[in-house]
DNA sequence: GTGGTCTAGACCACA
DNA sequence: GTGGTCTAGACCACA
């Protein structure tokens, strides 16, 4: 299957295009829809496909490389990298900012702990159904 | 209580200062921590308090006026406008994006539901102690 | 009849308070609802009545004096002045800016001359009915 | 045709420059003199053209975006948004305040209807000659 | 290249 | 005192 068909770019969205790509591609690798060693499409090809500036694709690839999702093969483009699994505590550490943000918002909105927990559990049970 | 003490500006954050203020002040009004008719601190006073340029405060006030949260009293500053408080469901709706963001991150990081819930409860119990 | 009852101040309106007063008072004199020699209420009295800053009333009185509608009686407040009628050509000259403004707006909005004239005639016939 | 030639900025006018631009540009779009998808001149270009600070243009563009007339294309400037043209009655509604203002002034100055209409027709015939 | 944010400082209208 | 407008100039994110 072509990778391009799995990616969705929304030019009008508030999150920058390159970030949309970083998020989606890393998720595809994290869920093994893209497998180690797979070749990525060239910057130019992806740029043409989305009618987007090649610099934008290049920036996304650069960040994915920095985060360890992709590897540069000199003269041959990018491929999906072998990637160490994060330890549980590393994962929790990466998650903490989102938790803090959520709690700060809840507090400011006057949402109490039980309501908050219930909303999270609701969302969890819904997400458990629809696969991403 | 002084309004200034309820507001927190993070100059280093990626969200612009004026947006932080718009968000926080509108929430304070929506949750009735600021009440209809209350006088807002003057642009210059708030600017001095946060060591920020008056235009930055002015931009926030301007947006809050446009959104109907504040009213201009010519020559006498701004006051909290008559406005319905947020209903519980409106508050939850405003909170939902933070929840979705958190869950998406957890999923991408492979953090399962029990670990996530535990982390949230930990954070909640800590926040219950330190007043904001 | 008390003058205060004939005046209406809208603190929330976009036109400044002092201008509202200038306009209304000059109109009252122009239509002889206020007559030459009538005493005006004191600045303080009017300010108290409208819960408005005395400087605002003072500014209105100042402009009305400058335009010849009021006369200052030292130590005794203001009274309605004897006032020369404007010549027809003076009136038209004073009116011209409003006409130019209207025509510029009509042009920019793509409203053609017949529609414009009809709208004016409509407005004229309506205004002919309701007294101001 | 260049957009710049359709816009007229009066630096000395009492209405702020950015408001003049908001008004004029929204009208050009509303009357379809600017069409959906048209690229707007860049902030810097327009600022240079009117010898005005870029922030002034930026403020105008920001308001036009908020009102739905323009759309931001990140990194690529602004373009005219998809938007319904103004109906004839909407145009008349926008014009009404100028008409009311004119009639109020005429009344206050004691200019009667026939003189007023004649003055308007005179102005119309003059404007019909000089193109704007 | 594009627009966005912020500063420091001037000047103004309104009350 | 209050907020509003504008400038000149710096710095940033995005494409």
Image: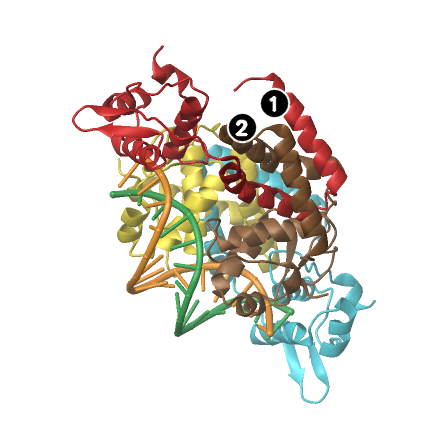
Chain colours: A red, B brown, C cyan, D yellow, E green, F orange
Q: Chain of mark 2?
A: B
Is A23 displayed left or right of B3 in the figure? Answer: left
Q: Nearer the viewer, residue A10 or A31?
A: A31
Question: Quadrant of residue B111 in the image?
Answer: top right
Q: Quadrant of residue D99?
A: top right
Question: Which of A24/C94 is in front?
Answer: A24
Q: Position of residue A90 (x, y in %)?
A: 49, 39
Q: CA distance from mark 2 to mark 1?
A: 9 Å
Badge 2 crowding class, 10 Å Cα cut-off, few under 14, some 14 to 19, many 20 or more, is some
Out of D52 and C39, give the one closest to the viewer.
D52
User: What x and y, as percent, mark residue C101?
Assistant: 46, 50
Task: Give the position of the N terminus of chain D as an image quadrant.
Answer: top left
Pair 2/1: label in front: 2
Q: Is residue D118 visible?
A: yes
User: To which residue does mark 2 refer?
Assistant: B107
Up/down of C106 relative to B28, above or below:
above
Where does the image place residue C47, in percent across and percent down from the top left?
Answer: 73, 73
> Disc 1 marks which residue?
A127
Q: Quadrant of the C terminus of chain D?
A: top left
The local crowd at label 1, few if under 14, some if 14 to 19, many if 20 or more residues have their Cα within 10 Å, is some
Tell me which residue sits at (58%, 45%) in the image.
A101
Residue occupying the far bottom of the picture: C75
Q: Residue sitting at 67 percent across and 73 percent down?
A: C57
| Vertical comparison of B94 with A124: above or below | below
Q: Residue at x 30, y 20 (%)?
A: A37
User: Given the image, what chain letter belongs to the residue carrying mark 1?
Assistant: A
Q: Secondary structure at mark 1?
A: helix
Residue B94 in sight: no
Q: Nearer the viewer, residue D46 or A130?
A: A130
């Amino acid at each position: 299957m072509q990778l391009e068909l799995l990616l969705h770019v929304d030019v009008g969205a508030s999150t920058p295009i390159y970030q949309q790509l970083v998020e989606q591609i890393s998720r595809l690798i994290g869920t093994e829809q893209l497998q180690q060693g797979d070749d990525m499409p060239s910057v130019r090809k992806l740029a043409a496909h989305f009618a987007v500036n090649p610099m934008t694709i290049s920036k996304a690839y650069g960040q994915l490389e920095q985060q360890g999702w992709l590897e540069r093969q000199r003269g041959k483009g990018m491929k999906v990298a072998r990637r160490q699994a994060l330890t549980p505590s590393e994962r929790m550490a990466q998650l903490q900012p989102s938790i803090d943000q959520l709690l700060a918002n809840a507090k400011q909105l006057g949402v109490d702990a039980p309501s908050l927990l219930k909303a999270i559990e609701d969302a969890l049970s819904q997400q458990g159904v629809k696969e991403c």
